[in-house]
Image: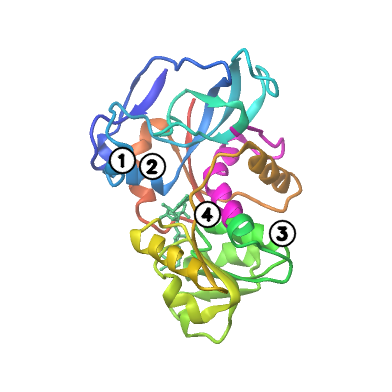
Amino acid sequence: MKAAVIYSYGKPEVFQIQDMPVPEIKANEVLIKVYASSVNPIDWKLRQGMLKYVFGSAFPIVPGYDVAGEIVKTGAEVKKFKTGDPVFCRLKNKYGGGYAQFAPAREDILAMKPEEISFHEAASVPLAALTALQALRDQGKIKKGDKVLINGAAGGVGHFALQIAKYYGAHVTAVCSSRHTKMMDELKPDVWIDYNTSDFLHGKEKYNIIYDVVGNKNFFSCFSKLTGKGAYITTQPYPSDFIQVGLSALIPGKSSHVIWVKSVGKDLEFLANLVKEGKMVPYIDKTFRLEDISLAHEYAESGHIEGKIVIEIT
Ligand SMILES: NC(=O)c1ccc[n+]([C@@H]2O[C@H](COP(=O)([O-])OP(=O)(O)OC[C@H]3O[C@@H](n4cnc5c(N)ncnc54)[C@H](OP(=O)(O)O)[C@@H]3O)[C@@H](O)[C@H]2O)c1
């Protein structure tokens, strides 16, 4: 099979497109013929070597956690899915492995691809939308009427978080630049703050949840902007954030959280239903062919993506 492989950490050019053996599957896994993947920041952070002390360096590495495709083989213990099913998921393998024509996946991380969206759109959903859902629902305990601020509302995680928060009936404040005026006009947050002209930390408003997807604030800087039991949630697992999580646990009231996304098939089914009902729409900024993966990573690293970057795999 064709795959985008790295043999060392470095710039986007370290990718090589080459033939690899089709992965073997275990009894509780399926083999997915991958039609599309997507780029998440963890992919380029991994490629740069930023995570080498966490993940090690077992080259060759095929990155890419998101996949959408068709099941071509099922293990003996697989019950819910069958050959031919169109599915999507966030792969649970250490380095991903989604930038390839085939990928193995456990059945408990899969969901059926909604008919309403293409494989390209489906591949843009899993990692980013699971991160949005699990943070708001499980850590923020979001409920109707909550005031929720999303810092970084136009990117992969942020644009899903905005839509999920609205689905839960929250009053949503979106923070992003005016590059994303059209997207914000369409997604209709209750309040939109352009971070180039004002800083939400200087406003009077208090929030039940501040979801810092960008990670350029912290629990202490947001403290006075949280309501009595407000939650600050960051996607950035910096050591200082874990210290703040620990400290906040000692103080009753406001809390600090670091989200670490999990591959959960049931959560993905929930998100698939939101897509079916038109309550969550994936935005695709650009699509690149697998052969152009270096260009896709270069673009992703610019940091001003609107929605998601999709990788087309034929
Ligand atoms: N811990 C986890 O489990 C987990 C899971 C997923 C993601 N993450 C992390 O979360 C971060 C975001 O991920 P992502 O997929 O959303 O990334 P992304 O799609 O690359 O996010 C890009 C967005 O960030 C916005 N942005 C940049 N600077 C900003 C600022 N100062 N204020 C507000 N918005 C700003 C950009 O908007 P403008 O164009 O307006 O600047 C752009 O829309 C990454 O660091 C990623 O590694 C962590």
Q: Amino acid at mark 3?
A: Tyr
Residue at the spot x=29%, y=33% of the render? 15
Q: Amino acid at mark 4?
A: Val
- Outermost residue on the bottom side: it is 204
- Classify 241 as above or below 206: above
- The answer to whether marks 2 and 4 mark residues whose Cβ atoms lie closer than 8 Å is no
- The answer to whether marks 2 and 1 mark residues whose Cβ atoms lie closer than 8 Å is yes
Q: Which residue is mark 4?
A: 157
Task: Kindly report the distance in space between the C-alpha atoms of the residues bearing marks 2 and 1.
Answer: 6 Å
- Asked if residue 293 can be seen in this view, the reply is yes
User: Where residue 167 is drawn, which disc sits there?
Assistant: 3
- The answer to whether marks 3 and 1 mark residues whose Cβ atoms lie closer than 8 Å is no
Q: Is residue 174 magenta?
A: no
Task: Kindly report the distance in space between the C-alpha atoms of the residues bearing marks 3 and 1.
Answer: 35 Å
Work out whether mark 3 precedes mark 4 in sequence or the reverse, and give the earlier one: 4
The answer to which of 310 and 105 lies nearer the viewer is 105
User: Where residue 47 is drawn, which disc sits there?
Assistant: 1
Query: Pointer 2: residues within 10 angstroms few (<14), some, or many (20+)?
Result: some
Task: Kindly report the distance in space between the C-alpha atoms of the residues bearing marks 2 and 3.
Answer: 29 Å
Work out whether mark 4 precedes mark 1 in sequence or the reverse, and give the earlier one: 1
Q: Amino acid at mark 2?
A: Asp
Query: Pointer 1: residues within 10 angstroms few (<14), some, or many (20+)?
Result: many
Q: Which residues are magenta?
A: 109-135
- State the SS at label 1: helix
- Quadrant in the picture for the N terminus: top left
Residue 143 location, quadrant? bottom right
